[in-house]
Image (tube, rainbow, N blue to C red):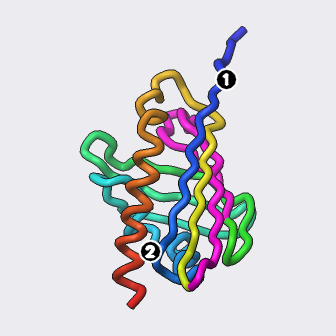
Amino acid sequence: METKTAVKKEVRIERILNAPRKLVWKAWTDEKLMTEWFSPRGFTNSGCKLDPRPGGVFQICMNHPQFPNHWSKGEFIEVKEPEKIVFTSKAFIDESGQAKLENINTITLEEVGGKTKLTLHAVVVKAAPDMEFALNGMNQGWNESIDKLEELLKTINK
């Protein structure tokens, strides 16, 4: 009988973005825009497929010298435009199609005086023992992605 160790890792980030909520929403739901920012520093994205509706697909291909052709795949659970997105993400998918890391991610967007308060809450629901490095880097990775989102928003919010 296989025993599993319970995993409890969460990241919660709040940021005020200098962009209207409608534009921040678009950056989370438009494939072209998400390809430009959704990954930590040092990664580039080579593909993205989004169908932002409950049951719709979430996929993005991130590339890094240590992790080429690294897909994060999942599905949208809840989509309430322009204020809330909940989606799963599965990463480090092995040859048999099993993910070594799975998260449920909740994004809320609040309008605050012409700006947007972004709240991200990522909860790990599955992590293989060799994913300790990913768990340890999760907060930094999400913060770097949001930094890149902020940089992108400055260029398109003129």
Q: Is residue 137 magenta?
A: no
Q: Where is residue 110 in the image (x, y as percent from the top left)?
A: 64, 73
Quickly name the residue at label 2.
Answer: 33
The tally of labels here is 2
From the viewer's side, name the closer residue of 51 and 116: 116
Q: Where is residue 45 in the image (x, y as percent from the top left)?
A: 36, 60
Q: Nearer the viewer, mark 1 or mark 2?
A: 1
Residue 39: image quadrant is bottom left
Q: Which amino acid does label 2 sit on?
A: Leu
Q: Position of residue 90 (x, y in %)?
A: 57, 44
> Which corner quadrant holds the C terminus?
bottom left
Specify the farthest residue to the left: 65
Q: Position of residue 52 (x, y in %)?
A: 65, 69
Lateral position of residue 69 relative to residue 100, left or right? left
| Mark 1 vs mark 2, CA separation in Å | 35 Å
Q: Is residue 90 magenta?
A: yes
Q: Give the range drawn in magenta.
A: 85-113
- Residue visible at 57% across and 66% down? 118
Q: What element carries label 2?
A: helix
Quickly name the residue at label 1.
Answer: 6
